Amino acid sequence: MKAIAVFPGTKEIQVVEHPEPQIERPEQVKLRLLEVGVCGTDRHICAQAFGSPPAHSDYLILGHEALAEVVAVGDAVTHLQPGDLVVPEVRRPCADPSCRACQAEHQDFCQTGTYTERGIKELHGYMAEYVVDDVRFLHPAPEGLRQVAVLTEPLTIAEKALDQALQIQRRLPWQTGSATSSEPGRGLTAVVLGAGPIGLLGAMLFVIQGFDTYVYSRAQAPNEKADIVTAIGATYISSETTPVEEFTKQVGQIDLVYEAMDAAPMAIEIIQHLNRNGIFIFTSGTNPRQPYGIDSAATLHNLTPLNQVIIGTVNAGPDTFTSAIEHLGVFQQRWPSILSSLITQRHPMQRASGVLLKKPGGIKHVVTIA
């Protein structure tokens, strides 16, 4: 079968012939891949910033944001059948029996760091015609989401971030009197830093959760991303025309910050303006070869007396995949044309290297497999 692979030794990306996998255990499912989203992680792997192939392989099959169709199931699989659509998880648990997180199927909180990840760390990914996977890591997607379900994995980042924020803030009476179980953010303000796919999907999630939502991104309006933000009922502000000090004056109190812009220095500036009892969530890392200064004294001066929380989040567990698929259905019903517009272009496998080696314009680029 054909697959798209990166060769760490030579830094080449090729369409390779890879052995077609077959079901070997009763709990396994064979999948025909339909499409795979491309993100910054894939480009970092292709640039050799990180990523590692499986043992005894000189290449890594790329791709972790996938939508697939079931073609065959093992004897122990009862809730999936050929023709069903599924979204697979990325991370697989470590083998250490003392890791309570992985033993509890929360490998996104792995305590040993020896987890594996499809298309990223020691496991081949989904940019292949067929994959065999354990049914535990597959989430059914309704046929009505076929055109947008590839956005599930990017949305899980925001799902996990919000879930952690709500859990942390149960320590205090953070919610306002107008908040409800379906809209826990009503009366609160959320700021999304960055208007890429992760930022825009996060903004959609915060809007339906009742937050007064602002997106602070580089490009000046009008632009495609600003139009999407406005269409979902949020507010777009450009950092090119509105510096941080002016931005925070316009927003007022900032109760929640969702960083989706590679942790740029601007994110650190925003921390200084976080409201009392506020929470700041980092979803991306920094480049250690491009450090920037931070006034730690000023940050800590606010952090402690104002009861603020700063957390980092990575990957997602089973519950967040389930909620992401459910919320994509909500987005699809509320903003049908807006949600699909996040996918800028679909590319055949033969042209995948063009979007893997450089970041093209638009929002989300997808590689079609079948």
Image (spheres, helix red, strand yellow):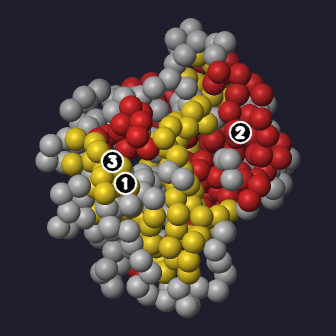
Q: Which mark is residue 15?
A: 3
Q: Assign a secondary structure to mark 2.
A: helix
Count neighbours of disc 2 (C-alpha within 10 A) and say few if under 14, some if 14 to 19, many if 20 or more: many
Q: What's the amino acid at mark 3?
A: Val
User: Relative to 19, is 130 on the left or the right?
Assistant: right
Work out whether residue 109 can be spotted.
Answer: no
Q: Measure the alpha-carbon separation of dots 1 and 3.
A: 5 Å
Instruction: List the single residue furthest toward the left.
Output: 9
Q: Assign a secondary structure to mark 3.
A: strand
User: Relative to 354, is 58 on the left or the right?
Assistant: left
Nearest to the observer: residue 166 or residue 67: 67
The answer to the question of whether label 1 and label 3 lie on touching residues, with beta carbons closer than 8 A, is yes
Q: Which mark is residue 339?
A: 2
Q: Assign a secondary structure to mark 1.
A: strand
Q: Nearer the viewer, mark 1 or mark 2?
A: 1
Q: Which mark is residue 3?
A: 1
Q: Measure the alpha-carbon separation of dots 1 and 2.
A: 28 Å
Q: Measure the alpha-carbon separation of dots 2 and 3.
A: 30 Å
Q: Which corner quadrant of the image does residue 258 belong to?
A: top right
Q: Position of residue 216 (x, y in %)?
A: 58, 25
Q: Name the residue: 25% across, 30% down.
A: 291
Work out whether residue 80 can be spotted.
Answer: yes
Q: Name the residue: 60% across, 64% down.
A: 69
Nearest to the observer: residue 52 or residue 146: 146
Count neighbours of disc 3 (C-alpha within 10 A) and say few if under 14, some if 14 to 19, many if 20 or more: some
Q: Which corner quadrant of the image does residue 34 belong to?
A: bottom right
Relative to 244, residue 2 above or below: below
Q: What's the amino acid at mark 2?
A: Leu
Q: Position of residue 309 (x, y in %)?
A: 51, 47
User: Relative to 31, is 152 on the left or the right?
Assistant: right
Quarter of the picture holding the N terminus: bottom left
